[in-house]
Amino acid sequence: MAAPLWIGSRCAPVFNTFVSSSRHSPACLDLCNRRFFSKKNRPKALIAPVGPLKANVQYPEPVQEGEIKYQEEYPWHEKTSPISQELYYSEEPPPSQGVDIGLPVQRFLGSKKFRQLKRKVNNENRANAELERAARLRTLKVPLEEIKKEWEASFGHEQLKDVATHYNIWKDLFEGAHFHPVVVTNMYFDSDGDHVVPVYRGNVVTPTEASRPPVVEYESDEDTLWTLILTNPDGHLRDNQAEYLHWFVGNIPGSDISKGDTVCEYFPPFPPQGTGYHRFVFILFKQEGPLDYSTEKRPSPCHSLRSRTFRMFEFYRDRQDQLTPAGLNFFQSQWDQSVRETFRNVLKMPEPIFEYDFPKPFIAPQLMIPHRKAIQYLDKYLPKEPVLKKF
């Protein structure tokens, strides 16, 4: 770090030190021949002290004894958290990162033309007296269904792609490759006769509500073939890179799911206790023609988790010339009481229960004068159990 700058001079004959203007005596003024200025006429130039200047070097902060002990116990942790360490030192992205594997997308107006069109429509609405009167009297009816269809046909697929990016669906299923869900799919679970639970893009559905196969609706030509897959990228109990296949229907003519070939029967969600929310992703593929899924065929009924192990990326990589992803829906689910019954009565296995193993909090040793360190050693005197106040 550069040496500080001073307003003054060195008075060698008298003090042999650097002094300010107020420290000069009348005797030393004659010896050092210094001329003083008033505050108004003081020059703006700054005079550096005589002597060699140190280089502008950033010296490291002094390491405390407690910090050395902490780095010995946790060598991977320096100044960042484990999550940020993993992000900073991650491996190179896979070759499929950023590749568009979906259907061609119709491009719409640019941002400038869209703003001009929006301004034009707003001016027309303000000039419409009947529209203004209906809005003022609160009798204006907004056609929500028409607005939804227009959104789905224009900007819906782009926003759904961004939502899937936020939930890391592309990274976990296709190793970074993505697609625009141009085919709008409407799904809902018929939990009972009176109520249905829709599947949007990330909403929460309990395992009890998703105990039966959902109703899937989408628009397509009758002479087209489709494949529908439901997978869980968060639930595998042994392999973090694998998934569990919950539903697989191939060679679907048009939009009639019941006429398709059931490769793997539907199985309800079973997120184990203590693992938080799991993502359950529906992927709709468009086929180029009839496909043979005999290698992916699962027994019926399939109650073996090993048989339901699935990898979406490998499945699509082997059939990328015959399949094109076109639709996407997903929901989130966490443990409830029905999961325990699924493990015990259907899977015939003990229910796994997970708990997070919190590390012991590190408390730095007490120092006389802590240098830029938080005073945390008082935490060890706090009671381990909450103290209930008695009034």
Image (spheres, rainbow, N blue to C red):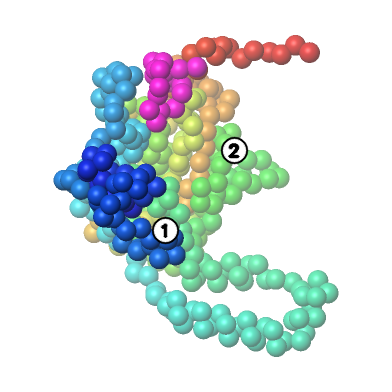
Q: Residue at x 63, y 81 (%)?
A: 122
Which residues make up the magenta segment? 357-378
**Residue 88 lies in quadrant:** top left
Q: Nearer the viewer, residue 307 or 123?
A: 123
Query: In the rendering, which numbered label is found on residue 350?
Result: none
**Sequence-earlier tag: 1 or 2:** 1
Q: Residue at x 50, y 25 (%)?
A: 273
Q: Position of residue 203 (x, y in %)?
A: 55, 46
Q: Residue at x 62, y 71 (%)?
A: 146
**Amino acid type shown at disc 2:** Glu
As for residue 215 lying within the magenta part, the answer is no
Residues under numbered marks 1 and 2 in contact, where contact means CB atoms less than 8 Å apart: no
Q: In the image, which is nearer the foreground, mark 1 or mark 2?
A: 1
Q: Residue at x 35, y 63 (%)?
A: 44
Can you say whether 348 is above or below 135 in the image? above
| Few, some or many residues within 10 Å of mark 2 (<14, 14–19, 20+) | some
As for residue 359 lying within the magenta part, the answer is yes
Would you say residue 233 is visible in this rendering? yes
What residue does disc 2 label?
A: 209
Can you say whether 362 is above or below 18 in the image? above
What residue does disc 1 label?
A: 161
**Amino acid type shown at disc 1:** Lys
Q: Nearer the viewer, residue 123 or 29?
A: 29
Locate residue 15 relative to residue 302 in the image: left or right.
left
Classified by dominant secondary structure, the portion drawn in magenta counts as: loop
Measured Cα–Cα span from mark 1 to mark 2: 26 Å
**Residue 125 lies in quadrant:** bottom right
Quadrant location of the C terminus in the rendered image: top right
Q: Position of residue 157 (x, y in %)?
A: 45, 63
Locate residue 123 relative to residue 391 in the image: left or right.
left
Quadrant location of the N terminus in the rendered image: top left
Q: Secondary structure at mark 1?
A: helix
